[in-house]
């Protein structure tokens, strides 16, 4: 039939060409849809500013993709500076990411640095209730001018996890990185607040947890305060690393990923990812 159309008219040639192109496009689309995506959500320690190193500061999410074989998995960094686990959801950022998530995808979340802010003020109004319980506080938000029910840090993490699972995707909870803050030659660890709460939520929800706070703190202790201060941070910021520090953090995220049991995402690591070490 195609041969007849091709010989009898130019229309037949166009029809045949159109059919072939349609088939090719369908094949490409199927191939792309079969490739999973790793979504990153979090605050500025995951993506600082526009993710372009403004002010010399970076988030680890800008470099973690270098450890994955991107011919087999996509990596999308949707973290947003200044957000907490609460405001990433209430300001609609999470809805935009959630709409893109497909079965077989992965979502790494890291929040905590901004959750300790005030629950209601005229500056950010981004804080969450400390802990993982079901406590709530009703407020008239001084910024949005709307009535709002504020929940605990753990509640918002559980909401992320529930939404991700409902999409058929895999959630991975990551604890906040430590700040460039020291005492007696050891970096200060977060052992009884957001790291602990993130781990508690991950454990009770039966999802993966990467203790990035501990992994980074161990690396900092090993390399020493002088080197960390001079190599991984600038003199104006003790929360956000410069490029060298964020590259170390990205490597340690991957090292933590490799330590997880039965985590299919690890199969997409490239040679650099397979060589990533916590030491």
Image (cartoon, rainbow, N blue to C red):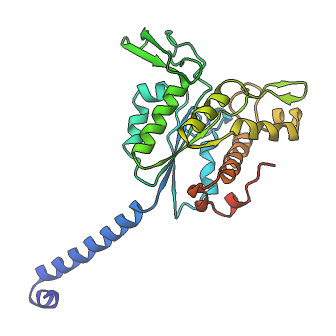
Residue 26 position (above or below residue 190) = below
Tell me the residue at 75%/41% (across/down). 215
Q: Position of residue 181 (x, y in %)?
A: 79, 25
Depth order, front residue of 13/108 = 108
49 relative to 219, above or below: above
Q: Among all residues in the image, which is located at the extreme left?
A: 8
Comparing 240 with 11, the one in front is: 240
Give the image location of residue 142, x and y in percent: 43, 9
Left or right of residue 217, residue 200 in this image: left
Residue shown at the point (41%, 26%) measured from the top left: 91
Q: Position of residue 217 (x, y in %)?
A: 78, 36
Q: Is residue 144 visible?
A: no
Q: Where residue 190 appears, x then y in whole percent? A: 72, 27
Residue 114 against residue 54 in the figure, above or below: above
Q: Is residue 109 left or right of residue 271?
A: left
The quarter holding residue 262 reads bottom right
Residue 214 sits in which quadrant? top right
Instruction: Decide which of 12, 104 is in the foreground and name it.
Output: 104
In which quadrant will I find the N terminus? bottom left
Count of numbered marks: 0
> Can you see residue 255?
yes
Residue at 41% across, 53% down? 103
């Amino acid at each position: 039939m195609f041969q007849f159309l091709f010989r009898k008219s130019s229309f037949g040639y166009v029809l045949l060409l159109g059919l072939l192109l349609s088939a090719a496009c369908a094949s490409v689309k199927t191939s792309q849809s079969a490739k999973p995506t790793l979504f990153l959500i979090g605050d500025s320690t995951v993506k600082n500013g526009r993710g372009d190193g403004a002010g010399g500061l970076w988030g680890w999410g800008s470099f973690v993709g270098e450890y994955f074989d991107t011919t087999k998995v996509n990596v999308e960094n949707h973290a947003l500076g200044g957000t907490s686990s609460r405001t990433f959801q209430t300001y609609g950022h999470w809805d935009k990411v959630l709409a893109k998530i497909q079965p077989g995808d992965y979502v790494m979340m890291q929040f905590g640095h901004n959750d300790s802010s005030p629950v209601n003020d005229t500056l950010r109004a981004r804080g969450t209730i400390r802990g993982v319980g079901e406590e709530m506080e009703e407020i008239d938000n001084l910024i949005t001018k709307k009535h709002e029910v504020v929940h605990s840090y753990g509640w918002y993490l559980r909401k992320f996890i529930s939404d991700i699972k409902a999409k058929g995707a895999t959630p991975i909870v990551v604890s906040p990185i430590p700040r460039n803050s020291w005492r007696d030659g050891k970096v200060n660890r977060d052992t009884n607040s957001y790291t602990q709460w993130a781990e508690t939520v991950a454990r009770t929800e039966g999802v993966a947890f990467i203790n990035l706070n501990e992994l980074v703190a161990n690396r900092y202790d090993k390399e020493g305060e002088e080197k960390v201060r001079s190599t991984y941070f600038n003199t104006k910021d003790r929360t956000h690393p410069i490029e060298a520090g964020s590259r170390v953090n990205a490597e340690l995220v991957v090292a933590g990923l490799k330590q997880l049991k039965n985590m299919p995402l690890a199969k997409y690591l490239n040679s650099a990812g397979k060589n990533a070490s916590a030491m």
